[in-house]
């Protein structure tokens, strides 16, 4: 006889629009941090940005290089392509990474790196001016004991991202089962696409905090079927499963979850101590 496993469906406890923030000469959507969302509900996720990076001489010529330390910096290419540089080479030398649609770049900033050197420079040299990359950037905290870790870079190309069909949904696993990318704490990051609409469900471990960020469309989330739409963040309450229902065709969202550290980050601009 099969054993039936009861699951506690998570409610959505808060839905909020991302606010617009100027950064590096462009407008960025910033769902996190938010003054209305306590960090304790999204720990270990510190920041989420969405932006379209235009490949142009102006962007490639900007001095966008800046320092970070104390967290994992991840950049996911939703569409298009771009390139960037970071000081994770031997002796802190700059090395470059090229992201195409579906790629994930993870930088463990640890005790400190420079990054965002020459954004789009490689594409510009190849005559691709006028194209753009739509990306989602997110910071995931490191435990205080790991803040001085050796900086490193890991590029996950699209063909190495586990992809599966689950009912109505196309699910890309950026962090989680089958992905080689690991955070400093157990985590789950999914890119979920519902081309024809419909529904989706996912196990989200009881001890994880979590939220969804809408890239496209609209759907009902959680046991309370709270509606969320493009550029909104929906924060999950307690439980061990998330249900998505009545999604519009073309709905796409990021599900981000992780085991909280329970530590209060100390923010010093680009540093998280």
Image: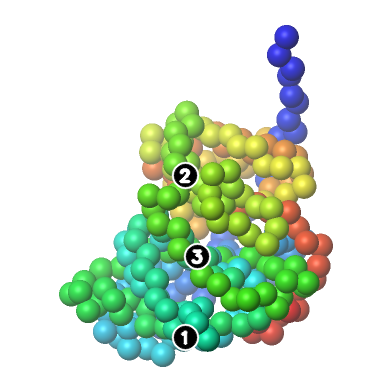
> Which residue appears at 58% of the width and 43% of the height?
177
Which of discs 1 and 2 lies nearer the camera? The answer is 1
> Which residue appears at 54% of the width and 53% of the height?
180
For marks 3 and 1, the one nearer the N-term is: 1
- Alpha-carbon distance for marks 3 and 2? 16 Å
Q: Badge 1 is on which residue?
A: 93
- Indicate whether 137 appears above or below 188: below
Q: Which mark is residue 82?
A: none
> Which residue appears at 61% of the width and 82% of the height?
112
List x then y, in percent, for residue 215: 46, 54
Front in this rendered view, residue 225 or 254: 254
- Alpha-carbon distance for marks 1 and 2? 31 Å
The reply, left or right, for residue 113 in relation to residue 14 is left
Residue 80 appears in the figure: yes
Q: Are marks 3 and 1 in contact (CB under 8 Å)?
A: no
Front in this rendered view, residue 115 or 40: 115
Q: Badge 3 is on which residue?
A: 154
List x then y, in percent, for residue 39: 74, 64
């Amino acid at each position: 006889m099969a054993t039936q496993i009861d699951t506690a469906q998570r409610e959505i406890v808060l839905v909020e629009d991302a606010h617009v923030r100027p950064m590096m000469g462009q407008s960025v959507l910033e769902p996190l941090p938010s003054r209305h969302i306590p960090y304790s509900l999204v720990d270990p996720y510190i920041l989420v940005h969405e932006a379209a990076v235009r490949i142009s001489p102006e962007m490639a010529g900007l001095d966008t290089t800046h320092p970070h330390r104390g967290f994992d910096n991840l950049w996911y290419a939703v569409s298009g392509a771009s390139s960037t540089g970071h000081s994770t080479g031997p002796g802190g030398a700059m090395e470059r990474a090229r992201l195409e649609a579906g790629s994930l770049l993870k930088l463990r900033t640890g005790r400190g790196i420079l990054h965002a050197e020459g954004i789009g420079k490689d594409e510009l040299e190849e005559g691709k001016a006028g194209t753009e990359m739509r990306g989602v950037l997110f910071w995931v905290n490191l435990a205080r004991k790991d803040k001085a870790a050796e900086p490193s870079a890991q590029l996950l190309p699209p063909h190495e991202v586990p992809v599966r069909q689950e009912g109505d949904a196309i699910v890309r696993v950026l962090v989680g089962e089958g992905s080689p990318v690991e955070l400093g704490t157990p985590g789950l990051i999914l890119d979920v696409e519902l081309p024809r609409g419909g529904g989706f469900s996912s196990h989200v471990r009881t001890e994880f905090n979590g939220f969804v960020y809408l890239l496209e469309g609209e759907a009902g989330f959680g046991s309370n079927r709270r509606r969320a739409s493009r550029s909104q963040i929906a924060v999950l309450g307690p439980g061990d499963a998330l249900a998505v229902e009545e999604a519009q065709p073309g709905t796409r969202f990021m599900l981000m979850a992780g085991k909280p550290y329970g530590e209060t980050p100390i923010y010093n601009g680009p540093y998280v101590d």
